Image (tube, grey):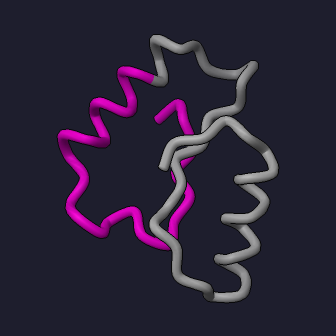
Amino acid sequence: MFSQDEDFLAEANRRQDKQINFAGVIYAHKLRVTVGDCVRDLEIIAKTAYLGELSNRVQYLPL
């Protein structure tokens, strides 16, 4: 799941702390990464990540 919502990021971090399984979050701060960079990095992740590799993780953009 991709998000730029800080509350969503906080929820993902809470789940990590409490060891609650979740699908994984790819997070980009709204003011620190351009839309073009997000699209490029999301494409890289989509082409290279293995199924389940991002489970229970938070991946920050830009890469």
Residue 14 higher or lower than 30, as above or below: below
Q: Residue at x 51, y 42 (%)?
A: 2
Residue at 71%, 53% (x, y): give it.
Answer: 9
Q: Residue at x 70, y 31 (%)?
A: 29
For the view shown, which residue lies furthest in the bottom direction? 19
| Residue 5 figure quarter | top right
Q: Position of residue 21 (x, y in %)?
A: 53, 82
Q: Is residue 36 above or below residue 21?
A: above
Residue plotted at (62% across, 34% down): 28
Could you tell me residue 52's position as x and y percent? 30, 69
Residue 54 point in image, percent of width and height: 39, 62
Q: How many marks?
A: 0
List x then y, in percent, for residue 10.
Answer: 78, 59
Magenta span includes 43:
yes
Q: Is residue 24 left or right of residue 18?
A: left
Residues drawn in magenta? 39-63
Image position of 22 with respect to 46: above or below: below
Res 50 quadrant in image:
bottom left
Judged left or right of residue 4, residue 51 is: left
